[in-house]
Image: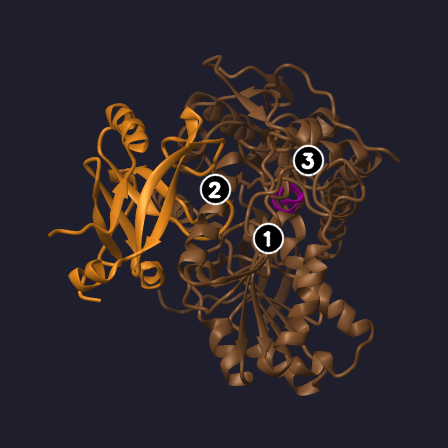
Amino acid sequence: MAYTRVDITEKAEKVLEELKEKHGNVIFHQSGGCCDGSSPMLLPKEDFYLDESDIFMGEIGGVKFYMNEAQFEYWKHTHLTVDITEGRGSSFSLEIPEGFRFIVKSRLLSKEEEHYFNM
Amino acid sequence: MNHTKPKFKEKYGNYINGEFVDPIGGQYFENTSPTNNQLIAKYPRSQKEDVEKAVDAANAAKVAWGNTSAAHRASILQKIADVIEENLNDFAAIDTYDNGKAIRETVNADIPLAVDHFRYFASAIRAEEGSATELNENTLSLIIKEPLGVVAQIIPWNFPMLMLAWKVAPALASGNCVVLKPAEQTPSSATFLMEKIGHLLPPGVLNVIHGFGPEAGKPLASSSKVNKVAFTGETTTGQLIMQYASKNLNPVTMELGGKSPNVFFNSVMDHDDEFLDKCIEGAVLFAFNQGEVCTCPSRLLVQEDIYDKFMKRVVERTKAIIQGDPFDMNTQIGAQASHDQYEKILSYMDIGKEEGAKVLCGGEAFKAGGEYADGFYIQPTILEGHNKMRVFQEEIFGPVLTVCKFKNEAEALEIANDTLYGLGAGVWTRDAHQLYQIPRAIKAGRVWVNCYHDYPAHAPFGGYKKSGFGRENHLMMLNHYRQAKNMLISYDKNKLGFF
């Protein structure tokens, strides 16, 4: 059986679909730090420089989800589900003008999932 | 005095070139208060054209403003400080309603510190000088500081007026024109400020535009007509803004948050005195400003032999925190700044519990009464666990403290430095050696020693590691907003003899 590190709720995927239509090629990058950090940012793909220090964690709703490797070290034992909530978040994430904010809900990886990801 | 909710107009404009103007596209967004989820007012949903208009106004003003004397600029900054001080209670009520924080904080901390910040830079710029070095008997090197020109500043929502002061005061003092974008959750005090002080400055010197990051922040950070970008926020947006600025080879300063350790050595409990009382308060300062501080002391490290006794008192003090009506002077913590922050904090409590953290107090939302029933309140929470848990590693930006034990100095340092960030830290001890050696070994830009959450002007503030770079709150910030012009002058009448 194939496991995933990151999933998306139906509600969040619906908003993501609309944003993809509006903005074209996009990526998720999990932020850390102050204020609006510790949340996933949806960004135009060509705007954000990705390299080997960004871990590809999976694809949700046709959008690739990345996290910086230093942050991944502290997050790798958890599974993430991207959800959406109403609210006036700030930051440069593309859903902000629509009055929504992507947030991430986490749970521990199961034994089977840990084994699958060679942990 | 009694503090009440401020009154607002239905909608506000951007402040560009010395006047309030409607957004060119005619779009507005609704700004609500996190205290009760009610509409405050509508603010411009600015687009690229609005940003360009503000940047052009700043460029048109920069030569004349850059040539004004330091004495002239200092006198204007003093007047700005006076106006804010005269209207202190109004500014405090606005930031409390817009951000959700308790009124006792805006009255006693946010606004007085903002006033002092303008005064500090008004004074610093007068006392400053360039340098002259005689490199040899005929050669003189003069270093003259020149303003960069136009600076773009993007500020956060946790201390709306104070973060404005930290950015705007040094930029204006050093002779720059500014285009400022306040956070979209807290646009009100910046707007009120321009209503009050706009006439003190020549048109175009200080411009305020409202709107969202992808629509207004991006064109501002990537504009080829600005000479510097200053940002406070989180890491991904920090990288993005640096990339936008890099296209123009523009300098940037970044303040990107932290996960600050607050370390208590066993000697703090040698006596049950005023100092121990101060230490307990120092541990409970995690709840200050609802935890929405980049330097929130959110990782408490306590030496194992005092752990149980010390934590008993910390939990007692935390449970005694008065929460609720942000306009009551007795309230100690107010509402979180927005619904998404509220949801994020609750989701962190879930993963913390799932990872095995033990809830020592709090652990859930707080139901405020009456007219605040729809606001976003969280109980001050203490989670006991270990440093590899995600709640110990990520900035939750809420009133959530994580606590763990350490055996000795080496382990304290290992845990304190096991983080991606390095903005703040606290060290508490009665041991004279630890007072110096432990702060020196912690990799953070600000280490409070036997105190915490003090932000006097002239104490530089900025990050190590992924917390960013640049030092605000100190006159060294002036050089982040200036060029160093070197004039190399020869007094030798004779030629080199090469040609």
Position of residue B223 measured from the top left corner of the image (x, y, whole percent): 41, 34
Circles 1 and 3: CB distance less than 8 Å? no
- Look at the image and say whether residue B303 sits in the magenta stretch: no
Q: Which residue is mark 1?
A: B362
Callout 1 environment at 10 Å: few (<14), some (14 to 19), or many (20+)?
some
- Look at the image and say whether residue B163 sits in the magenta stretch: yes
User: Magenta part of the protein: which range?
Assistant: B162-168
Q: Quadrant of residue A108?
A: bottom left
Q: Which residue is mark 2?
A: B227
Looking at the rendered structure, the kind of residue marked 2 is Asn
Q: Which residue is mark 3?
A: B95
Position of residue B351 measured from the top left corner of the image (x, y, whole percent): 41, 54
Q: Quadrant of residue A47?
A: top left
Label 1 marks a residue whose chain is B
Write down which chain is painted brown: B
Label 2 marks a residue whose chain is B
